[in-house]
Amino acid sequence: MKKDEAIAALKEQIHNIRLVRATKPFGATFEKWRRNTRVVLENAFPNSRSHVDEFMDIQYDLSVAGPSTTNDKHNAAYFRGLESAEVLIESFIEEIGKYWKGQDSARETSTSNLIRILGRLRECCQYLERPPSNEREVKDILWIMLRSHFDRVDREDTLPRFGAKNYRPDLGIPESRQLIEVKFIGDKTSLPEIQESIIADIPGYLTGNSRFDTVIILVYDYAHKLRDPKKFIEDLRSVDGIADVLVIPGIGARAT
């Protein structure tokens, strides 16, 4: 989630507190607001559990109540909880405003580092007894390469449904909120179809419910069909959400 998106989403949750105050305490509107706020915080602060925990620890009822406790006291505790939530969310917005620049800079560095690692695929393949000859073998090698650098590398993890379709990107790095989509160009591969399938999947990969912000496209050109990939790369780089495109020439295959 980008800085402006995070601030806007949190401000919306503050605005929605007014709707919650106008409804029955602990009703469906409250439960929906509380859950939606948790989801926003999980996406705004993906590398920190403390923000979600602080919000979820807010008490909206009395810690101790007896038979003589009136509804007025219960309601007062409920509204105090909403007030605490509003103040806390405002502090999160201030935190993003002051410190998010550093996080964006770190993400840019992380993207450059990830591209550097992926760019070594061909070098890593040269000493294999048999170079990769299909897309799954390329993914196997990439997973090993990435896992040596990152604590967690998701593989074909199903993302939240977008429209009528479930999306399963090839590889994901949760700590940097980046996806890697792998494409294999074989003897019978249609280049226009490859390009169209990439463009079609990007919105589903980066929907608001996703844990990821950008996608890096890696194309392993086994059949050497992209003799001059410059235009192919430039066109895909212009697509919103694609951070970069790498075309790796295949090893041991002849051009068709």
Image (cartoon, helix red, strand yellow):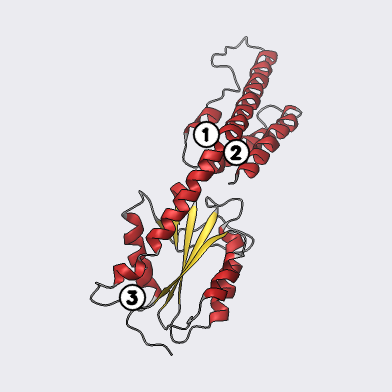
Single out the mark in the foreground, 1 or 2. 1
Query: In the rendered image, which quarter is residue 21 located in?
Result: top right
Single out the mark in the foreground, 3 or 2. 3
Quadrant location of the C terminus? bottom left
Question: In the image, what residue type sits under mark 2?
Answer: Arg
Q: In the rendered structure, which disc, 1 or 2, sits on the residue that comes first in sequence? A: 2
Question: Of the numbered discs in the image, which one, if any, rests on residue 52?
Answer: 1
Establish if 67 lies above or below 186. Answer: above
Q: In the rendered structure, which disc, 3 or 2, sits on the residue that comes first in sequence? A: 2
Q: Please, what secondary structure does the residue beneath circle 1 have? A: helix
- The answer to whether residue 168 is seen in the rendering is no
User: Do callouts 3 and 1 mark residues in contact (Cβ within 8 Å)?
Assistant: no
Identified at 68% across, 40% down, the residue is 8
Instruction: Out of 133 and 101, give the one closest to the viewer.
Output: 101
State the CA–CA distance, disc 3 to disc 1. Answer: 43 Å
Question: In the image, what residue type sits under mark 3?
Answer: Pro
Question: Of the numbered discs in the image, which one, if any, rests on residue 132?
Answer: 3
Question: Of the numbered discs in the image, which one, if any, rests on residue 35?
Answer: 2
> Where does the image place residue 100, in percent across and percent down from the top left?
56, 38
Q: Residues within 10 Å of mark 2 (few under 14, many from 20)?
A: few
